[in-house]
Image (tube, rainbow, N blue to C red):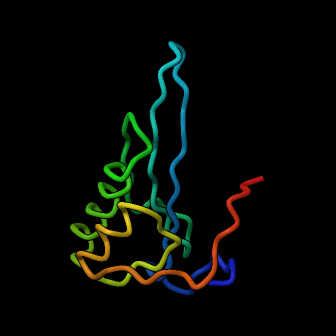
């Protein structure tokens, strides 16, 4: 991808991340959105109390159900999420690490 986060047609490239929100009482909730790089539209999302594999897997299951696809998901994946995607044969690992500095 070479950090080219643009797609020439819908549903060719999606991005995801986990974002933490702190509520007024101090509790935390986490959002796991999936964004289409063609027009920046929200494709799927999940909300959870923990930034874990359940949150991410939930978003991926929504995509698979919505688009009825088993397309390859290419991403920088670690731990249990990679195991889940490998089991479904729907992942191809990026050849290099992604810079984790979001600044």
Q: Quadrant of residue 44?
A: bottom left
Examine the rendered structure and indicate whether residue 26 appears above or below residue 39: above
**In this rendering, position of residue 89 left or right of residue 74:** left
**In this rendering, position of residue 21 left or right of residue 88:** right
Instruction: Name the residue nearer the viewer: 7 or 79.
Output: 79
- How many marks can you see? 0
Residue visible at 38% across and 79% down in the picture: 91
**In this rendering, position of residue 8 left or right of residue 42:** right
Examine the rendered structure and indicate whether residue 96 appears above or below residue 62: below
Q: Quadrant of residue 65?
A: bottom left
Residue 75 x %, y %: 50, 74
Instruction: Name the residue nearer the viewer: 101 or 4.
Output: 101
Residue visible at 32% across and 69% down in the picture: 83
Residue 19 x %, y %: 54, 44
**In this rendering, position of residue 95 left or right of residue 34:** right
Return the residue found at the far front: 79
Residue visible at 50% across and 61% down in the picture: 16
Residue visible at 40% across and 63% down in the picture: 43
Examine the rendered structure and indicate whether residue 43 appears above or below residue 5: above
Residue 61 x %, y %: 26, 62
Q: Quadrant of residue 5?
A: bottom right
Residue 90 x %, y %: 31, 80
Examine the rendered structure and indicate whether residue 39 appears above or below residue 95: above
Return the residue found at the far top: 25
Which quadrant would the N terminus be assigned to in this image?
Answer: bottom right
């Amino acid at each position: 991808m070479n950090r080219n986060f643009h797609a020439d047609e819908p549903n060719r490239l999606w991005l995801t991340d986990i974002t933490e929100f702190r509520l007024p009482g101090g509790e935390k909730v986490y959002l796991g959105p999936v964004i289409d790089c063609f027009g920046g539209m929200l494709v799927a999302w999940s909300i959870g109390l923990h930034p874990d594999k359940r949150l991410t897997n939930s978003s991926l299951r929504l995509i698979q159900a919505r688009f009825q696809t088993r397309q390859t998901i290419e991403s920088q994946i670690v731990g249990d999420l990679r195991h889940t995607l490998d089991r479904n044969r729907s992942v191809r690992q990026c050849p290099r690490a992604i810079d984790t500095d979001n600044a």
